[in-house]
Image: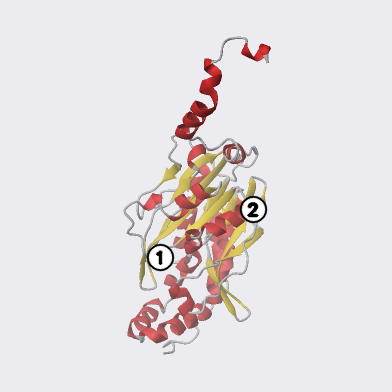
């Protein structure tokens, strides 16, 4: 089934509209990166709950709300959720028709319908994504992991996340390595490698969506030299009884990394997304010995900002000192030292 409308809108000039909208906000550039210490890195998760945007300015102002709160809390790096780059499709004058076509489309043809819609809106979505996040990163003077968007490259379609530096330039990008079943149906290709992103606050990697279900990705990130994992997510299945004791939290207990998880929630393209956001740490590094440094409830979009001490990862996970097994140590001492304790004083001098 084909779309019932031609190329819906080529919003050429959206770049200028976004820049003007951001200029009107009169943002004061922060000095959050003026002091750099791996023992005091401030990170922020910026979850987004989708709204019914009436115009492009509404979308830009929504992003700015989260940036202002995160940077105001001292954040040096802000992580937005997976597929935030798709949200402006709701501004299409043909969005209602697109949803109607999707509902009427046979299940086996829906994948092609979504692929066509992404292609027809591609120029607009790409321009909105890159302009919005580049400008916000530059205006606030911090690093921004701009969630992700669907991006065509040659004959391939990727779910890709970009990291912007404090000057608004691209540091690096990461493709989703394990697309969901829905994504495979409309042609999303798997990424080929995990990328180490080098920044002034430390080395990091990005795991998108269900990539966070695989411990191997975190293990590879650590092997590459990362100390921080950014985890933009967009979950359909979010009914876990203990949502913070899943995926990302478990990964950082297996592998010595800090992680920042940011969730997209709300309705988009006939899907309802939900989930929690948080900043997670290996239990031995956390003062409360729980590993949950900051957390939000389900579908709550309050930005979470906290400090992480990257230096702790190396010391705590020293394989010769990090494991504390009192029962084993007690039994070992009883076997090997009880007899020595009972020996007469001066015994060693007599040997």
Element under disc 1: loop
Per the rendering, the mark at residue 71 is none
301 or 347, which lies in front?
347
Give coordinates of residue 271: x percent, y percent. Answer: 36, 70
Q: Does residue 185 sit above or below 221 in this rendering?
A: below
Q: Nearer the viewer, residue 31 or 56?
A: 31
- Which of labels 2 and 1 is toward the front? 2
| Residue 132 drawn above or below residue 259 | below
What x and y, as percent, mark residue 297? 35, 50
Classify 10 Å Cα crowding around label 1: few (below 14), some (14-19), many (20 and above): some
Residue in the image at 56% along x and 11% along y: 344
Residue lying farthest to the top in this orientation:
345
Does the rendering let one see residue 335? yes
The residues tagged by marks 2 and 1 sit, at their Cα atoms, a distance apart of 42 Å
* Residue 74 x, y percent position in the rendering: 54, 40
Residues at marks 2 and 1 touching, judged by CB atoms closer than 8 Å: no
For residue 265, what is the image quadrant?
bottom left
Foreground pick, 87 / 219: 219
Q: Which residue is mark 2?
A: 223
Residue placed furthest toward the bottom: 1
What colour-coding does the image apply?
secondary structure
Disc 2, SS: helix
Residue 222: x, y in percent?
61, 51
Q: In which quadrant will I find the N terminus? A: bottom left
Q: Using the image, determine if residue 168 lies above or below residue 312.
A: below
Q: Earlier in the sequence, mark 2 or mark 1?
A: 1
Give the position of the C terminus as an image quadrant.
Answer: top right
Q: Residues within 10 Å of mark 2 (few under 14, many from 20)?
A: few
Q: Which mark is residue 53?
A: 1
């Amino acid at each position: 089934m084909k779309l019932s409308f031609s190329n819906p809108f080529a919003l050429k000039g959206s770049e200028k509209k976004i820049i003007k909208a951001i200029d009107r906000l009169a943002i004061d550039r922060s000095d959050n990166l003026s002091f750099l210490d791996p023992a005091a890195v401030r990170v922020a998760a910026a979850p987004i709950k989708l709204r019914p945007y009436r115009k492009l300015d509404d979308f830009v102002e929504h992003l700015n709300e989260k940036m202002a709160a995160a940077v105001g809390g001292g954040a040096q790096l802000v992580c937005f959720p997976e597929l935030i780059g798709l949200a402006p499709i709701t501004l299409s004058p043909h969005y209602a028709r697109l949803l109607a076509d999707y509902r009427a489309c046979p299940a086996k043809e829906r994948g092609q319908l979504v692929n066509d819609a992404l292609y027809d809106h591609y120029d607009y979505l790409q321009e909105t994504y890159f302009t919005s996040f580049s400008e916000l990163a530059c205006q606030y003077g911090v690093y921004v992991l701009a969630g992700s968007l669907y991006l065509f490259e040659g004959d391939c379609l990727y779910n890709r996340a970009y990291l912007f530096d404090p000057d608004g330039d691209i540091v690096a990008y990461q493709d989703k390595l394990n697309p969901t079943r829905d994504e495979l149906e409309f042609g999303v290709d798997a990424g080929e490698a995990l990328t180490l992103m080098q920044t002034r606050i430390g080395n990091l990697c990005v795991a998108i969506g269900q990539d966070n279900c695989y411990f191997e990705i975190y293990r590879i990130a650590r092997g590459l030299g990362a100390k921080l994992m950014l985890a933009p997510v967009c979950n359909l299945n979010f009914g876990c009884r203990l949502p913070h004791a899943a995926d990302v939290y478990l990964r950082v207990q297996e592998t010595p990394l800090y992680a920042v998880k940011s969730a997209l929630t709300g309705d988009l393209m006939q899907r309802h997304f939900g989930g929690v956001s948080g900043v997670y740490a290996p239990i031995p590094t956390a003062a409360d010995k729980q590993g949950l440094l900051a957390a939000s409830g389900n579908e709550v979009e309050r930005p979470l900002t906290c400090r992480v001490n990257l230096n702790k990862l190396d010391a705590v996970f020293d394989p010769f000192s990090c494991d504390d097994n009192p029962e084993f140590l007690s039994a070992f001492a009883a076997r090997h030292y009880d007899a020595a304790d009972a020996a007469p004083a001066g015994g060693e001098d007599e040997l």
